Image (cartoon, rainbow, N blue to C red):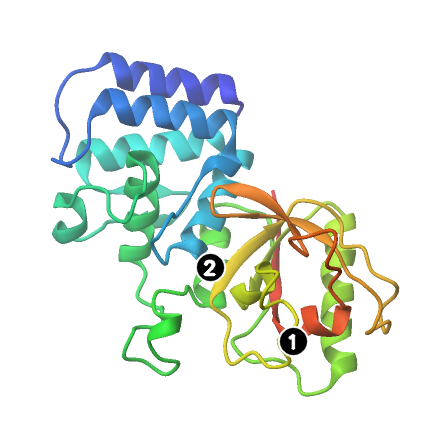
């Protein structure tokens, strides 16, 4: 399917009547925001919520399966539940009755909050890794979403812990590069400090707390060139940015590896 069929679904939805089952959402506003995301999937933005996992998933859904993306949002609005491939999404009443929270748009709230609320395998604020990791989607959960949504290739090489040996970590980065050059989308689990010029060189990372998606190839000096610079463009927070953030402050590969917890490679 194409953006043309997805937009036709949204246009029919916009022309219909009724308030749906989300009292905090408006049909016309939702329709326009869905059109915006179909045209530019990287505008999907979790804002101040911990929904980076759902955002990474929904962005690729809008990019690769725009009709499924549009139909899911429409069904959620009309009935409070939807099915994406074989992925069943049904948020609880608290989410459904809430207005969009933490600066999210209506289109992102209905999709991200619904998917997040339907998945149980997440770290809680009182869980194993503490409050700073609250809401992070576990790798197995995110890979399961892609599989059920009909992505034909889903390779999960992400973990909340890192390999103990640097060469194993370097091999993981090389694997991400290889999958990217072979046409896969690469969703990476990282410590978000790697996105900040003030914290990118930290020696230690305690836990991963953010999902980002590669939008270019990874450039480095070679698999074991730990002290050479590494760079890439990634999707995060409704936009694309570079790692490192500042071209005037290069990032050594060894510091990137400190904050890299693997990846999920997917392909339609």
> Residue shown at 49%/49% (left/top)?
56
Q: Taking 94 as reference, is 39 above or below it?
A: above
The answer to whether residue 99 shows anywhere in this view is: yes
Q: Position of residue 267 (x, y in %)?
A: 63, 46
At label 2, counting other C-alpha atoms closer than 10 Å, the crowd grade (few under 14, some 14-19, many 20 or more) is many
Considering the numbered disc 1 on the image, is that residue within a helix, a strand or a loop? helix
Label of residue 142 in the image: 2
Q: Of circles 1 and 2, which is in front?
A: 1
Considering the numbered disc 2 on the image, is that residue within a helix, a strand or a loop? helix
Left or right: 215 in relation to 61: right
Measured Cα–Cα span from mark 1 to mark 2: 22 Å
Q: Position of residue 164 (x, y in %)?
A: 67, 87
Counting residues from the start of the chain, the first of labels 1 and 2 encountered is: 2
Residue at the spot of label 1: 258
Q: Position of residue 201 (x, y in %)?
A: 66, 71
Considering the image in quadrants, where does the C terminus appear? Answer: top right
> Residue shown at 25%/20% (left/top)?
28
Q: Position of residue 137 (x, y in %)?
A: 41, 64
Front residue of this view, candidates 42 and 117: 42
> Residue shown at 52%/38% (left/top)?
42
At label 1, counting other C-alpha atoms closer than 10 Å, the crowd grade (few under 14, some 14-19, many 20 or more) is many
Q: Taking 22 as reference, is 101 above or below it?
A: below
């Amino acid at each position: 399917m194409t953006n043309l069929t997805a937009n036709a679904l949204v246009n029919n939805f916009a022309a219909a009547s009724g308030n749906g089952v989300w009292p905090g959402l408006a049909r016309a506003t939702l329709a326009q925001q869905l059109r915006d995301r179909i045209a530019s999937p990287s505008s999907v933005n979790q804002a101040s919520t911990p929904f980076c996992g759902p955002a990474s998933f929904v962005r690729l859904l809008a990019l690769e399966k725009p009709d499924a993306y549009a139909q899911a949002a429409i069904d959620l609005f009309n009935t409070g539940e939807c099915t994406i491939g074989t992925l069943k999404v049904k948020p609880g009443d608290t989410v459904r009755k809430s207005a969009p929270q933490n600066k999210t748009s209506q289109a992102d709230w209905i999709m991200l909050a619904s998917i997040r609320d339907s998945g149980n395998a997440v770290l809680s604020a009182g869980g194993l890794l503490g409050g700073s990791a609250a809401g992070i989607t576990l790798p197995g959960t995110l890979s399961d979403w892609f599989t059920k949504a009909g992505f034909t290739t889903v390779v999960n090489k992400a973990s909340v812990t890192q390999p103990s040996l640097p060469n194993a970590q370097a091999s993981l980065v090389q694997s991400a590069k290889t999958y990217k050059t072979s046409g896969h989308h690469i969703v990476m689990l990282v410590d978000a400090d790697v996105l900040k010029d003030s914290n990118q060189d930290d020696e230690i990372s305690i836990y991963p707390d953010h999902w980002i998606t590669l939008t270019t190839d990874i450039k480095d000096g070679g698999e074991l060139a730990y002290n050479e610079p590494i760079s890439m463009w990634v999707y995060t927070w409704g936009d694309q940015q570079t790692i490192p953030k500042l071209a005037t402050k290069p990032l050594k590969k060894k510091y990137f590896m400190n904050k890299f917890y693997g990846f999920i490679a997917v392909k339609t």
